[in-house]
Each structure stands twice: as structure tokens, then as C-alpha cells.
Amino acid sequence: MANVGYDNVWPKICPTVFIVRNIAPGNKTVRVFGYPIRNGQVRDLMAIPYVSEADIRHALLKGNLRIKFEHEEIIVVSSNIDLLQFDECHKDFLESIGITIGLDIDGAGYSATQEGEVLYSKDSSTFSATLPLTSDQGWLVNDQGILLFVH
């Protein structure tokens, strides 16, 4: 089995999950990452030794898991792994198979309404969204035109 993530035989400590259910027709047993899932049964893929979030992400977007979802052999029961997507095609696919968590940056509860909006804070706890001000040379400036140092 190819592993694109980090080798890990240690039990998981955080409650990160990617749980799927076998819904294949004909009482078929489905194999995922080399492990069988009997028809109607569930398996947390994050609990499989040597399987990382990176492995799941890769298999979902370009591998074995994508095919199993497209052929309606498995469904997502629960997922909270990082599947951040800036590609709308991949995001649409992930949403179509029931993944709702881990696809976007939360942004402290704010959703951008215009392309290019940024979040900024004067006190590190309250955030506002706005289109950034730039100088004639394209540098980020404050409302008085003073160059901002972004750290």
C-alpha cells in the first residue's frame, strides 16, 4: 500500500475521524486501504494503521476512494479531517458525497462577499473584513496612506 502521508502506527490521540459505510449492492464487501468493510458496516479510516489525512485526501481527490464514492459503494458517515479546497471542482465533489466540515477556512465566522477581501484586527480578537487599501505601487497601506508592515 502506497502511503503519501506520514507513517504512523501509533493510536490516534485527537478525535479526528473519517468514517465511511459500505452501501455496495449485492452484499459486496468493499476494501479500503487494504481493509475489508462488510456490507452495511462502518469503518473509521483514520483508525487504520499507517493511514493519514494526506492519504485520505489523495485517495478522495485522485484515487481509490473517489471511485468507490462515484460507484456508490461507500458513503461518508462522519468527517472532520482537513480537506481545505480552493478548487471548486474538488469542493463540489466533496460536498456531493456529504462532506461539510474541513472544506473552508472559518475566518472567525466571516464569509467573504467580494473577491480580494481580507480580515484584519486592531486588537487580535475582533476581526473586520474589507478590501485592502494599496499605494500606487501596490503596497498595503492604512487609511492614512502609511505603509503597513505585515507580520
Image (spheres, rainbow, N blue to C red):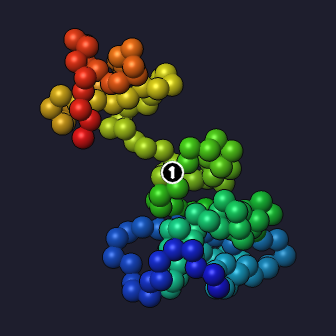
- Which residue was labeled with disc 1? 84
Amino acid at circle 1: Leu
Q: Classify the position of the C terminus by image quarter.
A: top left
Q: Classify the position of the N terminus by image quarter.
A: bottom right
Residue 57 in the image: above or below residue 97: below
Mark 1 neighbour density, 10 Å: few (under 14) some (14–19) many (20 or more): some
Q: Residue furthest top?
A: 144
Residue 136 in the image: above or below residue 96: above
Q: Quadrant of residue 39?
A: bottom right
Q: Position of residue 13 (x, y in %)?
A: 33, 76
Q: Position of residue 20 (x, y in %)?
A: 60, 68
Residue 95 in the image: above or below residue 13: above
Q: Residue at x 26, y 13 (%)?
A: 145
Q: Residue at x 38, y 29 (%)?
A: 118
Residue 88 in the image: above or below residue 45: above
Q: Residue furthest left?
A: 123
Kindly state the secondary structure of the residue where label 1 is placed: loop
Q: Residue furthest bottom?
A: 9
